[in-house]
Image (tube, helix red, strand yellow):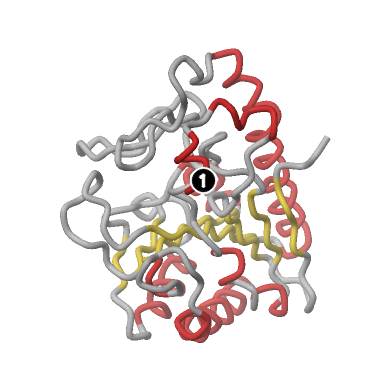
Amino acid sequence: MTKPYYIIEPKGKKVPIVISVPHCGLEIPEQLKNDYVDSQLESLDDADWFVHDLYNFASEMGITIIYARYHRWLIDLNRDVKSVPLYDDGRLITGLCSTTDFFGKPIYKAGKAPNQQEVDRRLATYFWPYYSKVEALLDECKEGFGEALLWDAHSIRQLVPTIQNDPFPDMILGNDNLTTASQKVIDTAFNQLAEGEYQINHNTPFKGGHITRYFGNPENNINALQLEMNKVLYMDDSERRFDTERANKVRSMLKPVFAELIEALS
């Protein structure tokens, strides 16, 4: 069976950090493509385009990367399995197997949305294998180093009115209100991020999705952080094409963040 994820192994000396990119996948299984609205299938919107490419420096630092093969419209790896909302402030929140995009437009043809049996199949086939692999990678880090950090990497449009009326800040560090990582790890990440020229928010308007909240267990030496960032920081103004110059600027800011985190974890 085709694995629902890709792994980029560390090239340098391995460190206790795993980067997860759950929303960069663009594939839809061939047998399901006819279920989707044609125009939606052509655009495959809502993806965190190229985020795994943005972090291409990480393997040289000894960091392991896991990223999704399939698009989040198949199943969203960063949602609760019962689609319990991550927030209760009235924003539009897509579910585990969402039937709309972030603007509320249908993604499935009439009568083609997955029933519960299909949702359960997708959980077993795509969702839990990703989680099991993340868990194995974190356990391996903890066994080798005594502590581990999961960095869940995301991006979003500059403006999504169904979530908030104002443009998002450049980056948002999330840790479910200081509960998914130790204070040392949180302070190291936030303070280093804040040294750059980008606007950095903390837990507002995003405090970490299901992956961060599921895996973060600092009392057991498993830390989890989510970094959300504006797509225009590393893509062009259309938010569809990768911009190498912008991406390299972000990379030059992120590298010292991970260097400090490696030091803090050691």
Q: For this view, does 146 lie left or right of residue 19?
A: right
- Dividing the image into 4 quarters, which one contains the N terminus? top right
Which of the two residues, 189 or 121, is positioned nearer the viewer here?
Answer: 121
Q: For this view, does 191 lie left or right of residue 148?
A: left
Q: Residue 12: image x %, image y %?
A: 78, 79
Quadrant of the rendered structure where residue 162 is? top left
Residue ranking furthest to the left? 165
Vertically, is 245 above or below 42? Answer: below
Q: Residue at x 48, y 77 (%)?
A: 243
Q: Residue at x 27, y 67 (%)?
A: 169
Vertically, is 128 above or below 212? Answer: above
How many marks on residues?
1
Q: Residue 71: image x %, image y %?
A: 57, 44
For the residue marked with disc 1, what is the amino acid? Glu
- Dividing the image into 4 quarters, which one contains the C terminus? bottom right
Q: Residue 219: image x %, image y %?
A: 54, 50
Q: For this view, does 13 lie left or right of residue 52?
A: right
Vertically, is 32 above or below 78? Answer: above
**Callout 1 crowding tier (Cα within 10 Å): few <14, some 14–19, many ≥20:** few
Which of the two residues, 40 or 226, is positioned nearer the viewer here?
Answer: 40
Q: Residue at x 16, y 53 (%)?
A: 165
- Residue underneath mark 1: 42
Which of the two residues, 229 or 64, is positioned nearer the viewer here?
Answer: 229
Q: Residue 34: image x %, image y %?
A: 59, 28
Quadrant of the rendered structure where residue 104 is? top left
